[in-house]
Image: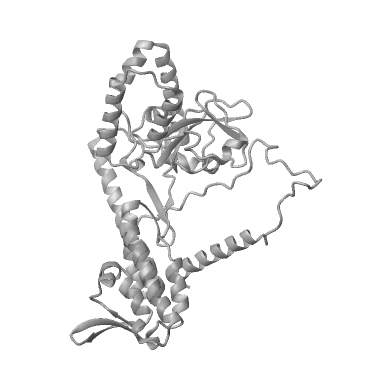
Amino acid sequence: MSKIKQFFKKKKDEAAFKFKLGGGSLGQGHSLSSSEPATSSSQGRRPDYEAYIPPKRKELSSEAKAAAEAALARIEKKGDRKAMNTSLAAIKARARQELQAEAAALKQENESANIEKTSTPTENVASVFYRCPLVSDEILPKKEWRNKIKEFLYQQLETSGEKALTSCLIIQNCNTKEKAEECVQTLCKYLENIINHPNEEKYCSIRMSNRIFSEKVRYVEGALDFLNACGFREILLDNELFMIWSNDNIEQNYDLPSLLEALKNAEQINLELDRNIKVLLPSQAKSVILPDDFYRISPEELKREQQLRTEAIENSQILKTKAMREREEQRTMRMYRYALIRVKFPNGLYIQGTFNVYEKLSDVYEFVQSCLQNESMDFNLMMANDGKFSENDMEKTLFDLRLIPNVVLLFTTAGEWGSDCNFVKENLLLLVQDM
């Protein structure tokens, strides 16, 4: 089965599941009048979440490996920075040294202030990355994925033999949302007219110079390919181009009702947010610069917004009420699309992941669980100000919990653990970078 057919089969199965769920065929819920007590979901500290499985990275080609070796040789030859020792013992020792240095600095207020003035923020997240299993195993920014998806769909159009289904996806993925919606509505009207009035010739031809056809169909990517698969062909009549429909020209194994259904059910190919896992030393986690991708507005708009807010504060001579402060905070929070979550372990190491602001706190727990050597370990996360999360918080979004745009959570677990204890999988320690 081709990837395109797999995509539509998955959407069809999901729609069937939702229909069954709505019809109540998956079993009855607990009755309010039932004498049997309902099982409480809050008896334990938290439910067992399925561990988040990081995607497998593609192996480097021989050419890429050779280039990497050459680059490493040049760096070693320059000798202007020491090689990073990624052994477990070395990382532990370095984390311990940094923790001791941090504790000593906190005791001396003047030195601490000096450190804050001279330290420069480190951009530990360069961008927001995504995965798209339908297309490939690569991990890329969204803009690169859009180009990659377009190339993939046009390649499938030429080679897969599924021109009808592929052209439906091209309409949804290679045009703006407004263009795609107008095009689909118009195409649906063409097909419905033929299905409902099969013997009326006026519905079997479309003048290509027609205003509606020119504005909403002709120049939309994938639209003419779809009409072609539905049985339309370009024909010149009296020095004017028409799209003429014939039942004999419909793509093999399809009919107009099934193609109409495919057109209505086609959607954008979803991208999966990659966590972009990083393991940081204490010195690397002191500060952060968020990339532009984290914001819903452009960098210019963001600077303008900050300037207006500063001017408003300076010019304001009235005290703000609690409601006013909350509205302003909500306005600020809505500027962000993503949240950068860092989890600090007792040994001083941090793990860092990228989340959508509407993902739940339970997703953060899954992420942390997937990074632990012992994934069955019972643990909790808490805010740096000793704020603990309740069972009800698990289903709340990061936006609702105000864990955006970036926050540090403390990893806690039962028992006494020394500063040398390592909780993170050893293969993740290779992600520690010398910045």
The residue located at (45%, 80%) in the rendering is 196
The residue located at (30%, 19%) in the rendering is 117
Whether residue 255 can be seen here: no
Whether residue 169 can be seen here: yes
The residue located at (74%, 46%) in the rendering is 32
| Residue 336, position as x, y percentages in the image | 38, 39
Quarter-wise, where is residue 337 in the image?
A: top left
- Number of marks in picture: 0
Asked if residue 70 is positioned above or below residue 241 in the image, the reply reads above
User: Is residue 33 left or right of 105 when viewed as pictured?
Assistant: right
| Residue 284, position as x, y percentages in the image | 38, 30
| Residue 305, position as x, y percentages in the image | 29, 33
Asked if residue 385 is positioned above or below residue 399 in the image, the reply reads above
**Quick one: 421 or 131, which is closer to the camera?**
131
User: Is residue 257 left or right of 362 when viewed as pictured?
Assistant: left
Q: How was the colour assigned to the protein in this rendering?
A: one colour
**Quick one: 357 or 241, which is closer to the camera?**
241
User: Is residue 43 left or right of 84 when viewed as pictured?
Assistant: right
Extreme-right residue of the structure? 35
The residue located at (39%, 83%) in the rendering is 250
Quarter of the picture containing the C terminus is top left
User: Is residue 414 left or right of 276 when viewed as pictured?
Assistant: right
**Quick one: 258 or 193, which is closer to the camera?**
193
Asked if residue 145 is positioned above or below residue 77 in the image, the reply reads below
Quarter-wise, where is residue 193 in the image?
A: bottom left
